[in-house]
Amino acid sequence: MDPLAVHMYLTPVCNLACTHCYYDAKGINDEPGPILTIEESVRAIDWLCSRFGADLHLEGGELFLRPDIDEILAALPQRCLSSLTLTTSGTVAIRVRPDLLKKLGDLRISVEGHTDALQRIMRPANLSRVRRTLEELRSMDVPFTLRITLFRANVPHIREMLQAFSEWGATRLSFFEFQSSGRGIEHADEYGLVDSMFDDALSAFAQSPPPSQIRLLKISLNQSREAAAEKALRAMEPLGFRKLSFSGIPNLTINSNGDLGVSPWEATAHALKDRFANLREVDFATEVDRQWKLGSLHANCEHTSSVQLRYERPN
């Protein structure tokens, strides 16, 4: 099946005001505006999973502030669940049946460090609530991935983070470099990595294999980092890292009000900069298929991940 990377925002509101939020989410007291219904969401997801080999990310805002998210997942054909990645800050209750959570492709919990001091630089939430969420998931045998932003303050602590996260019970980690987009534009000099800092980050990963509890570790990078990643891979390959390329995979973004666009980095809670239609105003399947055939779904965006360094611990 044809690959397609999909980002679908099911709510524009969030309980946190993270200073690096590229989506520029609305606050919980803001008017969310019209959002996709359960039926509209399910119909779109079902078709995407039927037509494409879709890597489909359901996000917000804070996804689990949407009270009917359990109903959306329960209404989907079971074959769709393994294509879904759900992302949350871990600071609100995950009101979804454990049997559904276990069938997901991934459930990601976003953190920015292993201490409150690092976490609160960008994300205004102490880790105690997040760690309760992790314990709840572990008690239900629900797999999860910690999603971490690499930024100026946490790069010197990569080895400490890996050890701490493994002690929290995490077995899967996914790292992304801070991108100067959305609210993050105002903090580029504070959070952004210059080349030497980025090289230091990859060197830290290359020092030794991740702790034994870590089964999967992914470092997703944009096109500007491909040469540095290729160079660092020479030292990382003996540890078990390999390179994957996402170049050429088309993108589709669906905003909470049904607007359709391409790059998720062009999306905010208020508008899609590259909007080409609204799900409610066109035949969704016909329009998306048309855009795909035209080649219009290839994101020309400097922030889009194009390469990944991946470590998988052998069994």
Image (spheres, grey):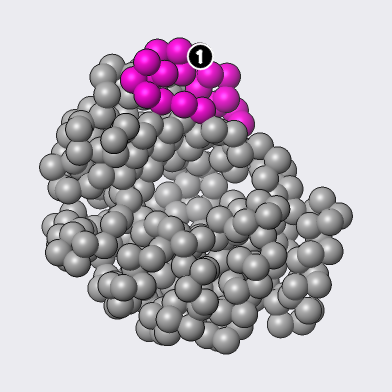
Q: Is residue 126 magenta?
A: no
Residue 34 visible (yes or no): no
Magenta range is 223-243
Vertical placement of residue 116 versus 214, above or below: below
Q: Position of residue 290 (x, y in %)?
A: 84, 64
Q: Is residue 224 magenta?
A: yes
As rendered, which of 84 and 30 lies closer to the eye?
A: 84
**Amino acid type of the residue tagged 1 in the rendering:** Lys
Question: Extreme right residue here?
Answer: 294
Rendered residue at 50%/34% (across/down) = 308
Q: Position of residue 200 (x, y in %)?
A: 36, 19
Q: Position of residue 20 (x, y in %)?
A: 42, 49
Rendered residue at 18%/60% (across/down) = 138
- Quadrant of the image occupied by residue 268: bottom right
Residue 158 visible (yes or no): yes
Q: Is residue 160 left or right of residue 86?
A: left
Total residue callouts = 1
Vertical placement of residue 89 versus 277, above or below: above
As rendered, which of 62 and 51 lies closer to the eye?
A: 51
Mostly what secondary structure, the magenta segment? helix
Vertical placement of residue 183 versus 56, above or below: above
Q: Give the class, few, some or many, for how many residues have Cα within 10 Å of label 1's Cα (few <14, many ≥20).
A: few
Q: Which residue is mark 1?
A: 231
Give the quarter of the figure containing the N terminus.
bottom right
Q: Is residue 106 left or right of residue 231?
A: left
- Quadrant of the image occupied by residue 288: bottom right
Rendered residue at 60%/58% (across/down) = 54
Look at the numbered disc 1 and give the secondary structure of its residue.
helix
Q: Position of residue 98 (x, y in %)?
A: 28, 72
Rendered residue at 38%/65% (across/down) = 103
As rendered, which of 206 and 114 lies closer to the eye?
A: 206
